Amino acid sequence: MTDRLLELFEQSNGAFLSGEELSERLQISRTAVWKQIERLRQQGYRFEAAPRKGYRLLAKPDIFDLPAFIGKLQTERFGKHVKYYDEVDSTQTVALSLVAEGAPEGTLVLAERQTAGRGRMGRQWHSPKGKGLWMSMILRPKHIPLSFTPQLTLLVSVALCRAIRAIVPVEAGIKWPNDLLIGGRKAAGILLESSAENETLQHIIAGVGIGVNLEPDDYPPELRNVATSLFIEAGYRIDRVELLCRFLLEWEQLYALYHEQGFAPIKLLWEALSVSLHKPIRCQTAQGLVDGYAEGIDELGALAIRLQDGTIRKMYSGDVEF
Ligand code: BTN
C-alpha cells in the first residue's frame, strides 16, 4: 500500500494531494491514508500537511550509495569488508556476532537506521533513517595492552575530527574523551567496546555515530539544544559516501602510525584538536563530580585534572562540562 501511495505522490510532482483524493484512489479510509503517511515519515520521507490542501511530498530518504562507496574507498583494509543494513537494533551487536564468526580487522557494519543505538554511559543513541552514519568497525589490534584502550578511543576521535574538517567547512573540535562538538553542540560520538585476554586486547568494536544530515525536527526535544548535525552547521546536505571514505582513510593511516610509533604522535594531534583542555571543567564520573582545571592528557589517554588543592587526578572515563 505504501508503494502505491508513493507512486501517487511521485506522479503529482510536488503538488498537494488531498486526503479525500488519496482515500478514493487507494480505496482506503482517510485514517488509513494518514497512517500510511506516518509510516513513510518513520522511513525518512518528509511531507508537508496543510489544512484543506492535503499532503505533498517534500523529500525522499537519502539511501547510502554502497556501490559508489566501494568504488571511492582508498583504504587497504578499513571498510573493505562491509555489511550494510537498512535497519538493525545496534551495529555494535551485529559487529559482535561477526567477531565471533572470525570477521577480519577492518570489517565495517553500517546501517541506515538503528532501533536501539547505544551511547556511552548506558545512554540511547538517536539514529534516524538515512540521516547519519551509524557504524561499527572491527579492530584486532596487535599486542596492545588492555590499559591502552583509551588511546585508541582518542585516535578514532582525531580521525573523525580531521575527516569532518576536511569535508565540511566547520570548526569541529574534540571534547574529552571523544565527543565531536561544533559550536558547543555534539555532532558525533564514539563508543569502544572491547574484549581482552591476559590483559591484552583481543578485539575492539569501535562504534561511531555521526549526525550528518539531520534537520532540527529530526531530534527529540531533549536533544535539540545539545546536539547538532553537519547539515545544520554547514547549511547544505553532506555527501555521506565522501565523508565516510575520508574518515576511514584518516583512521587507517593513524592506526598504522600508532602501531609504528605509539601514542605520542596521536596525543599531539588530539591536543591540537581538543576544545576541552586548559580550562576549568567539571567531570561527571560513576563515582561523582570532579571540579578542576583540565591540564592535559597523559601517555595512556587519561585526562589529568588539577584540583583546587593543587593535586592531579587522572580520569579514565566520564563526561566533561565546561
Ligand atoms: C556516545 O555516547 O557519544 C557514543 C555514541 C556511539 C553511537 C554509535 S552509532 C553506531 C554504533 N552503534 C551503536 O549502537 N552505537 C554506536
Image (spheres, helix red, strand yellow):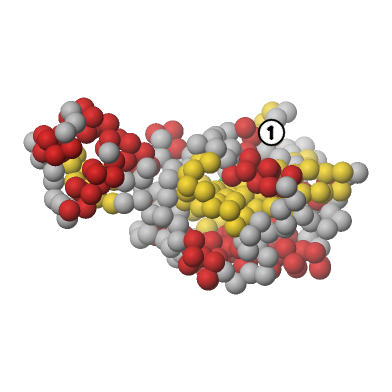
Indicate left or right for 201 with 213 as reference: right
The residue identified by callout 1 is: 285
Residue 114 placed where, x, y %? 51, 41
Name the outermost residue toward the front: 27
Q: Nearer the viewer, residue 310 or 169?
A: 169
The N terminus lies in quadrant: top left
The C terminus lies in quadrant: top right
Residue 118 placed where, x, y %? 58, 38
Residue 209 placed where, x, y %? 55, 48
Indicate left or right for 244 with 105 as reference: left
Q: Is residue 176 above or below residue 117?
A: below
Element at label 1: strand
Tell whether circle 1 marks a residue whose Cβ is less than 8 angstroms from ligand 1. no
Q: Would residue 28 be visible to someone looking at this image?
A: yes
Name the outermost residue toward the left: 52
**Residues packed near mark 1 inside 10 Å, few (<14), some (14 to 19) or many (20 plus):** some
Q: Nearer the viewer, residue 295 or 3?
A: 3
The amino acid type of the residue labelled 1 equals: Thr
Q: Is residue 284 above or below residue 69?
A: above
Residue 44 lies in what quarter of the image?
Answer: top left
The residue sitting at 36% across, 39% down in the picture is 42
Q: Nearer the viewer, residue 101 or 318?
A: 101
The residue sitting at 53% across, 41% down in the picture is 88
The residue sitting at 42% across, 61% down in the picture is 238
